[in-house]
Amino acid sequence: MESLKGHTILLVDDEQDILNFLSYNLKKEGYKVFTASNGEDGVKMVQQIHPSLILMDIMMPKMDGIEACQVIRKDLNISQPIIAFLTSRSEDYSQIAGFEAGADDYITKPVRPRLLISKVESLLRRLNKPASGAKDSTSSIKIDREKFMVEISGKNLLLPKKEFELLELLASRPGKVYSREQILTIVWGNDTVVGERTIDVHIRKLREKLGDDYIRTIKGIGYTFSES
């Protein structure tokens, strides 16, 4: 599988300590990192460096994150990056405005380094996925993201949103072991309070529908998806 390392990431935030923290941890993982301190400079830099991923604050001088995201999404001359808002704001209206502007996801500040890296990896994997509505074939399982439907051995299963997202995550990298912490962060998000028991329940429901052959428990660590 193609390595995610080496991708270009643009950080846009008016707090220098946040930029330093994020830049240090991402560079340590092998990513190419550029920074901007406001939305206006961020937009200009996108046109120069063509990043794969943008992590951007909402409240910034000159041009806020919402407006910057809108400008980027309207630019037909660039390869569109993944955009995630990095913000301490948790109000529903700001998240709705962000998604309407074209954001792909949110990362809530403050964020721990391990969770940051897991989230970045999850976001970058989307670049290699087929367009919405396309199907991924993994052994006898086909995943249709547009319909939240899974086809297994010719039988269609319409899964609830979180069950689907959990299966999609595990199946995106067969053999990779995802810790419970990673699953909670990627599927449920940093600002959603759920217990590890929630994962167990969703795994049990998936096994009831798919059979016991696909999702393996790695004791004391988490879960992995097996093609065999």
Image (cartoon, grey):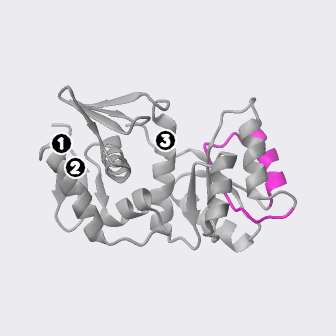
Residue holding disc 3: 126
Q: Amino acid at mark 3?
A: Arg
Residue annotated with mark 1: 210
Q: In this picture, is 223 found above or below 24?
A: above
Outermost residue toward the right in this view? 62
Within 10 Å of disc 3 (Cα), the crowding (few <14, some 14-19, many 20+) is few
Q: Position of residue 43 (x, y in %)?
A: 79, 47
Amino acid under disc 2:
Leu
Displayed quadrant of residue 80: top right
* Amino acid residing under circle 1: Leu
Residues at marks 2 and 1 touching, judged by CB atoms closer than 8 Å:
yes
Q: Which residue is mark 2?
A: 206
For the point 18% across and 59% down, which residue is it?
218
Image quarter (top left, top right, bottom left or bottom right) of the N terminus:
top left
Residue 76 placement: quadrant: top right
Residue 164 position (above or below residue 131): below
Q: CA distance from mark 3 to mark 2?
A: 22 Å
Task: Decide which of tag 1 and tag 3 comes sooner along the chain.
Answer: 3
Report the Cα–Cα distance between label 2 and label 1.
6 Å
In this rendering, does residue 207 appear at all?
A: yes
Q: Front-most of 191 and 109? A: 191
Magenta highlight range: 38-61
Please give the name of the residue rendered at 37% of the width and 39% of the height, measured from the top-left corner. 148
Q: Which tag, 3 or 2, sits closer to the chain's start?
A: 3
- Identify the residue shown where x is 37% and y is 71%: 194
Within 10 Å of disc 2 (Cα), the crowding (few <14, some 14-19, many 20+) is: some
